[in-house]
């Protein structure tokens, strides 16, 4: 992927200093980053200090089609899950306006995704397979969600195995 040549995947750390098991990079005017200083959106790659590459036109077209022409996204987080990578249950709360949708595209190995109400309570497990597109709008926008595990070998799409998730958002 050309965008990854420009903005290499890297392994961020949580504000507590624990490495994420997921590797990340971004496309767009803003990228989501995490380090000892906290979670935030910023205009440059933390390692190269260069601007993120632009969001691929095909993804902007997908956003327009699926969100019924919501104002365009300014951030696309790229998450790479290899081996035993996972993502704990969380809410996406670093964006300025929660009325904008979030759009997720899954590629490669199938993920066991967990989702529950913003307020807490029971969660449900849903499989996200390669090509699945998920629009999070309305009350689902602040749902708690995470990736329990990835089913290794369930797809041959990603060289070296694993799963890529693209998450398009309006950060500002
Ligand atoms: C439900 N990524 O980067 S995408 C994240 O598969 C993140 O890499 C997961 O959660 C992944 O923050 C899940 C599906 C998704 C994305 C955003 C959501 C589900 C969501 C926002 C609200 C509710
Ligand atoms: Fe999330």
Image (tube, rainbow, N blue to C red):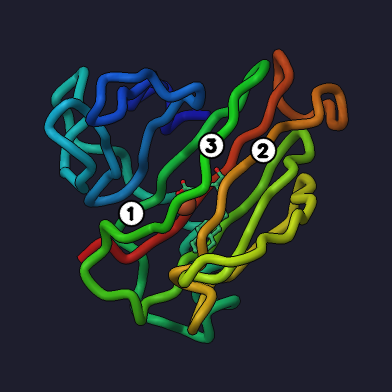
Would residue 70 be found to the left or right of residue 98 on screen?
right
Would residue 157 be found to the left or right of residue 12 on screen?
right
State which tag comes first along the sequence, 3 or 2.
Answer: 3
| SS for dot 2 | strand
Between disc 3 and disc 1, the foreground one is: 3
Q: Is residue 98 above or below residue 57?
A: below
**Callout 1: 10 Å neighbours few (<14), some, many (20+)?**
many
The alpha-carbon separation of the residues under discs 2 and 1 comes to 24 Å
Q: Are marks 2 and 1 in contact (CB under 8 Å)?
A: no
- Which residue is at a point 27% across and 37% down the rendered structure image? 33
| SS for dot 1 | strand
User: Measured from the top left, where is residue 27 in percent x and y?
Assistant: 36, 43
Looking at the rendered structure, which numbered label has been put on residue 87?
Answer: 3
**Callout 3: 10 Å neighbours few (<14), some, many (20+)?**
some
Beta carbon of the mark 3 residue lies under 8 A of ligand 1 = yes
Residue ID for mark 2 = 148
The alpha-carbon separation of the residues under discs 3 and 2 comes to 7 Å
**Callout 2: 10 Å neighbours few (<14), some, many (20+)?**
some
């Amino acid at each position: 992927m050309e965008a990854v040549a420009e903005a290499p995947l890297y392994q961020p750390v949580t504000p507590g200093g624990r490495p994420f098991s997921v590797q990340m990079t971004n496309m767009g005017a803003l990228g989501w980053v995490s380090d000892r200083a906290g979670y935030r959106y910023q205009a440059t790659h933390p390692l190269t200090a260069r601007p993120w590459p632009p969001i691929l036109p095909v993804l902007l077209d997908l956003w327009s089609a699926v969100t019924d022409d919501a104002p365009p996204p300014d951030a696309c987080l790229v998450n790479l899950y290899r081996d035993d990578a996972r993502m704990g249950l969380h809410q996406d709360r670093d964006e300025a306006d929660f009325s904008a949708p979030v759009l997720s595209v899954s590629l490669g190995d199938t993920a066991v995704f967990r989702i529950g109400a913003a307020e807490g309570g029971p969660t449900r497990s849903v499989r996200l397979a390669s090509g699945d597109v998920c629009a999070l709008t309305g009350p689902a926008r602040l749902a708690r969600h995470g990736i329990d595990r990835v089913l290794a070998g369930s797809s041959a799409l990603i060289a070296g195995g694993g799963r890529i998730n693209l998450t398009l958002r309006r950060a500002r």
